[in-house]
Amino acid sequence: MRWVATTPAGAPRPRRAQPRPYLGPPSYPAPPRWGFPHLTWRWPTAVPGTPTGAQAPAQRLRMIARNATTVLWTLAVLATIAAIGEFWRYALLVDSRDSALRPGVVGTSDALVLSFSLLTFVLALFAFAVTLWWLFVARSAAAEDSGLEPPRPAWQVVLGTLVPGPNLVLAGSILAELEHAALRRPADVRPRPSRLVFGWWAAWVGNGVLLALTVVWRMRDGVQADADGVVLSGLTDLAAATVAGLTALIVRRITRLVAPLDDAEVRMLRVVRVSGAPAVGRRPRPRTAAR
């Protein structure tokens, strides 16, 4: 017995599709990425118009960290020069008790203090904004790397860094939590800040206390109060320079922990020789082949 398949009676026959007119060669919005590459290994690329075109948090973190480090070290230099100007002004005040000062020296001292104090204040605002941006990106990158949510919501981080008074207490704990996540420690373990974070926290609190004391002391009247205000301003500038330098070190350290790969520091790989590989089989060359 043999089975024969036939079309049932009354079944509609499929229509033959009409061939579409030729519209030219195929086009793509971006270079196709399917298929095997011509190289054995290559650096990852990002094609515009595709999901790979967006930067990962680790890539953005390295870019922001480079800018933040540059701004912070520049701020440290400017704050140090401003502190030198304040101490020079105090030395001139002490010298003016016994002898008259030359107008040129006084004018140079005032210009040095005013110019670098203004530059330090403006750059401090910019450095604070860039560092806060780096902090949020670092929290996102650390959370993505560990697969855990950040221990604090974003609004607590904003309040803990911007509100005067509470930021002296909360800023150190926020930074310690970020370091804890960057070191990939368990989430149920209490964060233990490193010596660098402890040093930054102490400098941060000292800078805030000196700043508040300087503002209050400047409101007093008298020659001695003015001289004490100059000394406090110099100490505040030195504390600000210390905070900026320690912040730059922390930014570099945590960035290397969260995103250790830096394309600018990694050497390109090159195959020098292959050892132990089997010989490649080749076909004999035809005698009639042109050389």
Image: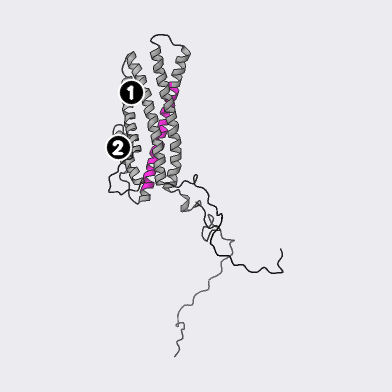
Residue 170 tag number = 2
Q: Residue at x 31, y 28 (%)?
A: 209
- In this view, the residue in front, 122 or 139, is 139
Question: What secondary structure characterizes most of the magenta part?
Answer: helix
Q: Residue furthest bottom?
A: 1
Asked where in the image residue 201 lies, by quadrant, the reply is: top left
Q: Earlier in the sequence, mark 1 or mark 2?
A: 2
Please name the residue shown 45% across and 23% down the image.
115
Quarter of the image with the N terminus in it: bottom left
Q: Position of residue 229 (x, y in %)?
A: 34, 20
Could you classify mark 1 by the number of other residues whose Cα lies within 10 Å: few (under 14), some (14-19), or many (20 or more)?
many
Q: Position of residue 274 (x, y in %)?
A: 55, 58
Q: Is residue 105 visible?
A: yes
What amino acid type is highlighted by mark number 2? Leu
Residue 278, x across and y down, in percent: 55, 65
Q: Which mark is residue 214?
A: 1
Q: Name which residue type carries label 1.
A: Thr
Tag 2, which secondary structure? Answer: helix
Q: How dense is the environment of label 2, judged by Cα within 10 Å: few (below 14), some, or many (20 and up)? A: some
